Every structure is written in C-alpha cells, then in structure tokens.
Amino acid sequence: MPNSSSISEFLLLAFADTRQLQLLHFWLFLGIYLAALQGNGLIIIGIACDHRLHTPMYFFLLNLALLDLGCISTTLPKAMANALWDTRDISYAGCAAQCFLFVFLMSAEYSLLTVMSYDRYVAICKPLHYETLLGSRACASMAAAAWGSGVLNAVLQTANRFSLPVCRGNAVNQFFCEIPHLLKLSCSISHLREIWATVVGVSLAFGCFVFILFSYVQIFRAVLRMPSEQGQHKAFSTCLPHLAVVSLFVSAGFFSYLKPSSISFPSLDLVVAVLYSLVPPTLNPIIYSVRNKDIKCAVRKVTSHVSELSSLYSHFLPSLVSFAVIVL
C-alpha cells in the first residue's frame, strides 16, 4: 500500500470519459470562469473608482469580490486544464497548495460574511452609532481579522491533513483537492490530530453561523417595527442579497464537510462542491447588483470608460501601424 512518502501526485476526478464531453466541460468551465472574473472585476473596479461607494458596506463587498476571485481561480483553472489536456494528475505540492488556498479563501469569506451581517445589523438596528462603530479603522481591522482567520484555519487544516500518512491510494473523488476526500485516503480516520482540527474548524464555523443568525433575527425584528413600507423595502433590499449568499454558502459548505459517510456518493459530492465553490463566486456579483442602483451606476461608468478606451484604441491603431511600417 502506498504511503505519503511514496506518493508524488494525486489523481483528480474526471468529469467524462469521452473526448467530446471533456471539451464540453472545458468550455462550460471557461464560461463560468470568465463570468466570475468579469462580474467580480467590475465590482472591484467600480467600488474602487467611485468615491460615493467608499463606505463600510461596499468596502466589505470589495473584499468579498476579491475572495471570490481567488477562490474560483484556485480550483477552476486546474479542472479546465485537466479537461482540455485529458489528464487527471496534480502534483503533491500542487495539491497541498490548492488545499491551503481553498481553505484560506473559503474560511476568510465565511468570516467576512459574518462581518457583513454585523454591518447590516448596526446599520438597521443602531443607525445613530453606525459611524462610530464602523469607522475606517474598525472596518480595516475587521477585514484583516477575516483574512487572518482564514490563514490560521488553512494552516491548521492543511498541516493536519498532509501530516497524516496516505495508504488508500491517490485517487481523489473530487475535481479539486478537498479536505474531506483527502482524509479518506489517510490510514486512520480516527486520528487524534484529525479530530482536534475538525473540532476547531466546526467550532469556528458554528460560532460564525450563530452570530449571523442572531444578527438577522435582530434585523428582521427591527425592520418589521418600521412604520413606513418604504423603509422596510429599503432595509430588505440591502439585507436579502446578503442573506441569500450566506444561505447558499453555509448550507452547501456544511453539508459537504459534515455529512455522514453513509450518504457520500460521487455525483452528490460533485454537485455540492460546485454549489459552494463555483456558484457563489459567479452569482454574488449578480445578487449584490441586481437591486442596488449604486453598484449598477458604478458598473455602467466602468463599462463606458472601457468602451471609450477600446474605441480610442481602435481609432489610433491603424495610424500607429502605418507609422511603424514607414519607420521600419
């Protein structure tokens, strides 16, 4: 039986056996990846360039878009390359790096979603104290804490997994190096270090979940007490997108990491992994901008500037080419 010292690579899950379906998956993943890049990129540039959006809510949204870009860029390019080149392998070091980055970015995103729920809680339940509780220094500290918690959890989980010996082959039944599937390859499923790392991760996740749940209970109580329907509509329009993102992220993530092994099937695991690793980075820009006029306005400005630059470039390109030809 192989052990961790003799394994130099892992084999990821193949989406299809036929070449046509592999290419179909490549183009599908490419479309998803480009959509996520475009959506999150427009939000990042729009918020950074529009001074009206330099507020705590949009500062956290910018951080969320950065995390989404990093998360989908950690898993999807390798899956696309494997589908295009008809391969399954990923090096041992590459798998460790992918595992670390994925856990880091997902943990940081979950922590940031918790911070964003606190932002909405203060904005709706304690509006008079909003600028005091969420000043620029406090926002930067909370964002740094979210990113830092992701690093610490990633170090813990990755070090725990890759310190365990592997004696059950090197085939990972997932399209990226996911910890639950990597743990199935270890020699002992009841190792003390594994249990300790799992308890720490679950405790942090459950603590964030309780905080988010408490925040939204208080938010809905405050919104329902508002006298005007316009105020209720405005409050719900800023909270419901965040609640939709949290619900999808938490439900799929918890199911993937905490489901019993008796209901673990390759097709089910694949669907759940897609739901929490690919769908949120792609849909978050749409969810947060579909009913947000400020984001729509900022995105329109960015796209208009890009179109102006492209038209200017296409206008001067023939002249530049002619000049280069004359000079040469």
Image (tube, rainbow, N blue to C red):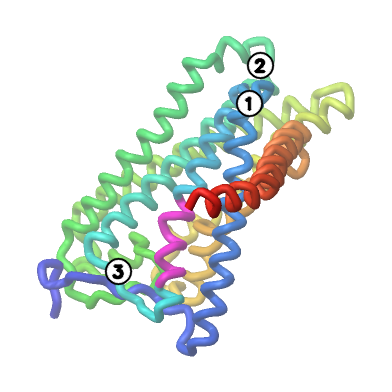
Q: Earlier in the sequence, mark 2 or mark 3?
A: 3
Residue 90 in the figure: left or right of residue 292: left
Q: Which residue is mark 1?
A: 121
Residue under the point 73% across and 40% down: 304
Residue 319 drawn at (x, y percent): 64, 48
Residue identifier under label 2: 126
Q: Residues within 10 Å of mark 3 (few under 14, many from 20)?
A: many
Q: Residue at x 27, y 61 (%)?
A: 94
Q: Residue at x 71, y 34 (%)?
A: 298
Q: Position of residue 12 (x, y in %)?
A: 35, 73
Question: Which disc is residue 59 wearing?
Answer: none
Q: Crowdedness of circle 2 by 10 Å Cα count: few (<14), some, many (20+)?
A: few
- Sequence-wise, which precedes: disc 1 or disc 3? 3
Q: Disc 3 on helix, strand or loop?
A: strand
> Which residue is labeled 3 in the image?
90
> Closer to us: mark 1 or mark 3?
3
Nearer to us: label 2 or label 3: 3
- The reply to whether dot 1 and dot 2 touch (C-beta < 8 Å) is yes
Per the rendered image, the range of residues in magenta is: 71-81
Q: Is residue 219 magenta?
A: no
Residue 167 showing in the rendered view: yes
Tell me which secondary structure the magenta stretch mostly adopts: helix
On screen, residue 179 above or below 149: below
